[in-house]
Image: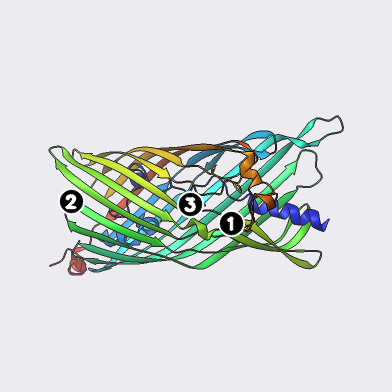
Amino acid sequence: MRTASRTTFVAALIATQVATAGGFDTPVLYSARHMGMGGTGVSWVYDPTALYMNPAGIGNTEFITLHLDLSPIIASIEAIPEKDTEAKAGPAVLVPFLFGSSFRIWKYLTFGIGAYPVASASGGYKYDSKLSKDADGTPLEVTDETTIRFIEISPALAFNYKDILNVGVGYRLTLAQLKRFKETEGATSPFFDFDASGWDFAGVRAGIQYRPIKYFSVGVNYRHKIEPVAEADSGTLIAAVEDIKYPLVLPSRLSFGFRADVPLPIGSLGISTDAEYGFQSQNDTSVATYVLGGKESSLNVPFKWKDAWTVRWGAELSFLESWAARVGFVWDQETSNRSFSSAFGTPPADTWSYTLGGGYKAKSWEVNLAYAYRSGGTTITQEDVDARDPDGKDGPEKAITCLTCSFPGEHQIALHGIYVDFSWYFDMPSAIANWSRTAD
């Protein structure tokens, strides 16, 4: 029984890479204004979305800004969760949100705070098992579900100098949640059933925006790695286990961006590009622990991800003073290891996202809408499976079985995102205007 429980616990943990992008990050999250332009904004974000994108951007706040973004995402994946069994996960409906505010406390200093999922996805299969059958030999239906979330609360400060230079830093409190459930039709109890969560209090995000001339800006943003430990007092992993602990890694990212605007007779045309480098190799092997029968055991869970680029491009046409139309795309480089790819995650392949959007900006408020479509796929071969090596040094001759990793066959992902955001801008009272950044 102990051997079986150890084996199934490996399975439960490996299957947490759910419908995500390069690693756990999702390249199509926030906000509607930015997603219309392919998610660009490192160099020019000017509202509380900056808490997620580049904290230097809150330095563009005039007095007080409130911002709300809702990003319903419908995602589905096709993979081989069990040998010779093709299955489709989803569609899973997610509703990431971002709520933030920023407040100019001095003409050179702005404070902001917000809350948002920084990585949020889920996946679930229903398929007829080739391994579990009833007395008549009929395959039994398997329900297999996983949910993972990283939710951040981030206060930040930004220094602004004469509309030319913004420097910002944000502190990140991150909650990680991991839920796992698997049950075979007619079983007296689930195979897997646990809900683990944990906090990380060591996160930081820092960035710069530089605008040497009115129509051109550049930006840099860095997000440091965090390692929250998801914990559960008890759970079901074939047998009952206790004190489950599993460290999740959200790797570091370094982003660069620029934006250029060209005045036109009807308004202006803006072009924006961001390039993000994810240090995904920081998610190499996780060591999970649990207690079975009063004894603690540990397991090495191989991910073996590799560093990868995400490149974004967007264009915005502003016209009639208040209206804007936007278009963009995103290229997300292959991150996961083909030998250890999960049936619950993005395939080990490049993915492409195409975006459209528009918005209206009045004096004291702004509304934006956007749509994104993301897709990608690949074929996992038997050679990929045979090359599994958790230590990265023994080669195919010492290949191991990676439970719940993908089996040979076609793997695909398709995602639709619909985005809407609202921003409210409050003018500075004249009584304290001498403290504003526009004061003489």
Q: Could you give the CA–CA distance between mark 3 and mark 1, rounded to whole angstroms?
A: 14 Å
Outermost residue on the right side: it is 135
Q: Position of residue 332 (x, y in %)?
A: 43, 45
The residue type indicated by label 3 comes to Asp
Mark yes or no: residue 415 visible.
no
Tell me: residue 19, above or below residue 62.
above
| Disc ID at residue 215 | 2
Give the mark nearest the N terminus, 1 or 2.
1
| Disc 2 secondary structure class | loop
Tag 3 residue: 25
- Characterize the local packing of mark 1: few (<14), some (14-19) or many (20 or more) Cα atoms within 10 angstroms: many
| Disc 3 secondary structure class | loop
| Disc ID at residue 416 | none
Q: Position of residue 119 (x, y in %)?
A: 50, 52
Q: Could you give the CA–CA distance between mark 1 and mark 2, rounded to whole angstroms?
A: 42 Å
| Disc 1 secondary structure class | strand
Report the front residue among 18 and 410: 410
Report the front residue among 120 and 402: 402
Quadrant containing the N terminus in the rendered view: bottom right
The residue type indicated by label 1 comes to Gln
**Residue contact at pointers 3 and 1, CB within 8 angstroms:** no
Q: Position of residue 82 (x, y in %)?
A: 69, 39
Q: Could you give the CA–CA distance between mark 2 and mark 3, rounded to whole angstroms?
A: 31 Å
Q: Position of residue 258 (x, y in %)?
A: 27, 52
Tell me: residue 157, above or below residue 340.
below
Tag 1 residue: 177
- Characterize the local packing of mark 3: few (<14), some (14-19) or many (20 or more) Cα atoms within 10 angstroms: many
Tell me: residue 438, above or below residue 276.
below
Give the mark nearest the N terminus, 3 or 1.
3
